[in-house]
């Protein structure tokens, strides 16, 4: 029997997740039949293409194949990358996978802007169907859509759960409406059920030749989704995954639920997305023009997902899934090639919008690599020699001091500067090492070996999708620190790329701020770095 809790979960999921695919009929058929003759053969052919696109792309590729690779049904470009990289031995292959994942993430950002714009615009355009409002100008409709967009993005900080409750009942009514109208239409024209037969899809493609092939670029809209809230919430999740896997810079993250840490709000992503959505709305003005540009980036992401998925199944020796994934990837490539003709009619905006996050990712990841080399970390053996000499010869400060280091065998220079240059040594010094696991979930923490008198290692191992409370973990392990030291870099450079990287570093929170460690205990140690 369906419990009240399960019913509430269903309603919320309808408002947040399933509304994405459920709102596609608003514009998919409208856009297709703007350019397609209204004949019985064409209607059956288009409907058959839509049905089988949903089956192949949504059900087979994502709901089955991609989600089967995760531990808890998670999927996506970052997850596939984290699964694939440990399976590869060649550095060149790993570089290819990393590049593919960067492109996939960036393309998703590109269509992530168009999705809210087209869904809100297409909904507002329904006003012209109301008697007395037929003459509403496109400019007025865009202004109304912009006001709705501003309101939608402004309430994001209230949290996913509350917003889902607001949209859930609306989506229930929407699904009941399209189900009822669809049932009545089937009673009037039962022959429409023939569209389930893929024969009509193939016949449409064969009879219409190249024109039928390009229709695929509009058919794929049924699988891309137009639901604004689903894309916004999904964007927060993707950005967080990018942060934890060190692909994106650390941005301020707010947790909007006391029960579920997975419910987050990222203000920077929210407002940048809003500005981009408003720009696209005022540039295109009409949803059918947006639809002509929509789908290019998302089909690129689908194709990349298919390639990475196929590679994983091959390396795991799952030949049946490998063969199915190959077929799905072929379908994705067909949709992508069909969508390329959208570039001159506005599809270039998807590419331009994708270039922005791609550039940020490339600059940030390259800068992190360059900075780590420029920091010249100290070998552990050398560090211990200096530490033991100092610890035995000076007066120690009472209490516990925390330091953070990614790799314990290579001590960051800020730790050495604090101790050896400034003679700041506490009675108890703990170096905290946070290690990202290959698995998406799981958190474990423990003290490792004692390196020397008054010097211990505390290790936190976490899945790359985990949202952890570092302060809580430390407290539960009996650590009551007096001071937390962390490194800050003053980057000096004449290189324009590294100047951009330095600006990104200055505008984003430090590591300890991202993990919300107590500010009254924080002490930043500045190091001047030439890049």
Image (tube, rainbow, N blue to C red):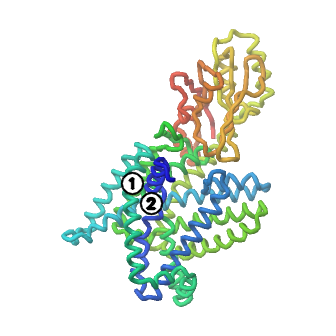
Q: Is residue 327 visible?
A: yes
Residue 373 pos. (x, y %): 70, 40
Compared across the picture, whether 42 is left or right of 478 comes to: left
Location of residue 202 by image quarter: bottom right
* Residue for badge 2: 19
Q: Which residue is mark 1?
A: 167
Where residue 48 appears, x then y in whole percent?
Answer: 52, 79
Q: Number of labelled discs?
A: 2
- Please name the residue shown 45% across and 57% down the image: 14
Q: Nearer the viewer, residue 56 or 87?
A: 56
Location of the C terminus by quadrant is top right
Q: Which residue is pictured at 79% across the width and 63% down the height?
A: 317
Front residue of 502/20: it is: 20
522 or 209: nearer the viewer: 209
Q: Residue furthest left?
A: 132
Q: Quadrant of residue 499?
A: top right
Quarter of the view holding residue 431: top right
User: Which residue occupies 39% across, 69% down?
Assistant: 178
Check disc 2: other Cα within 10 Å, few if <14, some if 14-19, many if 20+.
many
Gap in angstroms between the C-alphas marked 1 and 2: 9 Å
* SS state under label 1: helix
Residue 325 place in picture, x, y as percent: 68, 68
Please give the label number shown on residue 449: none
SS label for mark 2: helix
Report if residue 254 is visible in the image.
no
Mark 1 and mark 2 lie on one chain; the one further toward the N terminus is 2
Horizontal and vertical percent position of residue 3: 49, 49
Query: Mark 1 and 2 residues: CB-CB less than 8 Å, in contact?
Result: yes
Q: Residues within 10 Å of mark 1 (few under 14, many from 20)?
A: some
Q: Nearer the viewer, residue 346 or 77?
A: 77
Vertical relation: 405 (above or below) 1: above
């Amino acid at each position: 029997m369906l419990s009240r809790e399960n019913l509430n979960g269903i309603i919320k999921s309808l408002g947040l997740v399933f509304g994405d695919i459920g709102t596609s009929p608003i514009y998919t058929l409208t856009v297709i039949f703007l350019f397609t003759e209204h004949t019985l053969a064409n209607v059956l052919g288009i409907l058959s293409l839509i049905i089988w696109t949903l089956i192949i792309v949504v059900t087979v590729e994502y709901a089955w194949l991609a989600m089967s690779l995760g531990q808890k049904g998670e999927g996506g470009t970052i997850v596939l990358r984290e699964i694939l990289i440990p399976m590869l031995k060649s550095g060149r292959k790993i570089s290819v996978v990393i590049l593919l994942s960067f492109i996939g993430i960036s393309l998703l950002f590109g269509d992530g802007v168009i999705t809210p714009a087209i869904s809100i615009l297409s909904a507002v355009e329904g006003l012209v169907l109301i008697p007395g409002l037929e003459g509403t100008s496109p400019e007025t409709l865009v202004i109304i859509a912009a006001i709705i967009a501003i309101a939608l993005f402004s309430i994001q900080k209230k949290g996913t759960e509350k917003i889902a409750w607001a949209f859930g009942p609306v989506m229930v009514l929407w699904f009941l409406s399209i189900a009822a109208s669809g049932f009545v239409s089937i009673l009037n024209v039962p022959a429409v059920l023939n569209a389930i037969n893929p024969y009509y899809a193939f016949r449409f493609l064969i009879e219409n030749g190249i024109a039928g092939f390009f229709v695929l670029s509009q058919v794929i809209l049924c699988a891309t989704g137009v639901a604004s809230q689903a894309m916004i919430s999904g964007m927060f999740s993707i950005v967080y995954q990018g942060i934890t896997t060190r692909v994106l810079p650390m941005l301020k993250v707010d947790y909007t639920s006391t029960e579920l840490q997975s419910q987050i709000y990222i203000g920077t992503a929210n407002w940048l997305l809003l500005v981009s959505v408003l720009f696209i709305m005022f540039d295109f003005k009409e949803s059918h023009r947006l639809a002509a540009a929509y789908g290019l980036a998302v089909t690129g992401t689908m194709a990349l997902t298919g390639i990475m998925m196929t590679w994983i199944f091959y390396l795991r020796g799952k030949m049946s899934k490998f063969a199915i994934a190959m077929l799905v990837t072929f379908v994705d490539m067909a949709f992508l090639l069909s969508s390329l003709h959208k570039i001159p009619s506005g599809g270039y905006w998807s590419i331009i919008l994708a270039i922005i996050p791609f550039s940020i990712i490339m600059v940030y990841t390259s800068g992190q690599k360059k900075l780590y080399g420029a920091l010249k970390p100290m070998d552990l053996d050398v560090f211990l020699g200096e530490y033991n000499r100092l610890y035995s010869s000076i007066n120690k400060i009472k209490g516990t001091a925390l330091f953070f280091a990614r790799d314990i065998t290579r001590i960051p220079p800020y730790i050495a500067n604090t101790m050896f240059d400034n003679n700041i040594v506490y009675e108890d010094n703990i170096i905290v090492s946070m290690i990202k696991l290959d698995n998406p979930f799981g958190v474990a923490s423990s003290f490792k070996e004692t390196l020397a008198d008054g010097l211990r290692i505390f290790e936190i191992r976490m899945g790359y999708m985990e949202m952890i409370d570092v302060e809580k973990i430390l407290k539960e392990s009996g650590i009551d620190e007096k001071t937390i030291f962390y490194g800050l870099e003053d980057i000096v450079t004449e290189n324009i790329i590294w100047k951009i990287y330095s600006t990104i570093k200055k505008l984003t929170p430090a590591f300890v701020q991202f993990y919300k460690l107590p500010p009254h205990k924080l002490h930043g140690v500045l190091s001047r770095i030439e890049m």
